[in-house]
Image: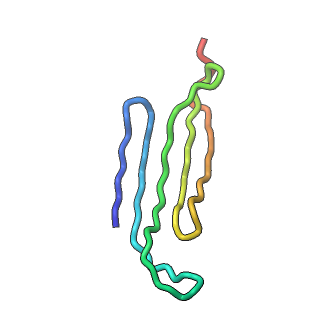
């Protein structure tokens, strides 16, 4: 099992955790893989408006599955 989290001075935030998992293949073969999940965010300037991009994700035997949302942080900069 693992876990980490950090934030930077320019608005980036990251968090991730994971664990080992037994995966049974289509042919019945048993393997061990990592199941991870996490989130990260960063700021963008879009036409003078600062917005925060948030990505929440899961990665396992079904692949990488992100969900992205964008929210406004501040009004237009003059």
Frontmost residue, 51 versus 1 = 1
11 vs 35: above or below: above
For the view shown, which residue lies furthest in the top direction? 78
Residue 11 occupies quadrant: top left
2 vs 69: above or below: below
Horizontal side of residue 51 vs 13, given as left or right: right
Q: Position of residue 44 (x, y in %)?
A: 56, 30
Q: Position of residue 39 (x, y in %)?
A: 49, 51
Q: How is the image coloured?
A: rainbow
Frontmost residue, 30 versus 67 = 30
Q: Position of residue 54 (x, y in %)?
A: 55, 44
Q: Position of residue 17 (x, y in %)?
A: 40, 60
Residue at the image position 63 percent from the left and 25 percent from the top: 46
For the view shown, which residue lies furthest in the right direction? 47
Horizontal side of residue 3 vs 69, given as left or right: left
6 vs 72: above or below: below
Residue at the image position 36 percent from the left and 49 percent from the top: 5
38 vs 74: above or below: below
Residue 26 occupies quadrant: bottom right
Residue 7 occupies quadrant: top left
Q: Quadrant of the C terminus?
A: top right
**Image mark count:** 0
Q: Quadrant of the N terminus?
A: bottom left
Residue at the image position 61 percent from the left and 37 percent from the top: 71
């Amino acid at each position: 099992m693992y876990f980490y989290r950090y934030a930077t001075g320019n608005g980036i935030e990251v968090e991730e955790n994971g664990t080992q998992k037994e995966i049974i293949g289509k042919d019945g073969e048993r393997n061990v893989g990592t199941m991870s999940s996490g989130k990260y965010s960063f700021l963008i300037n879009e036409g003078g408006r600062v917005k925060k991009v948030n990505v929440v994700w899961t990665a396992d035997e079904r692949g990488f599955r992100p969900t992205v949302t964008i929210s406004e942080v501040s009004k237009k900069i003059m």
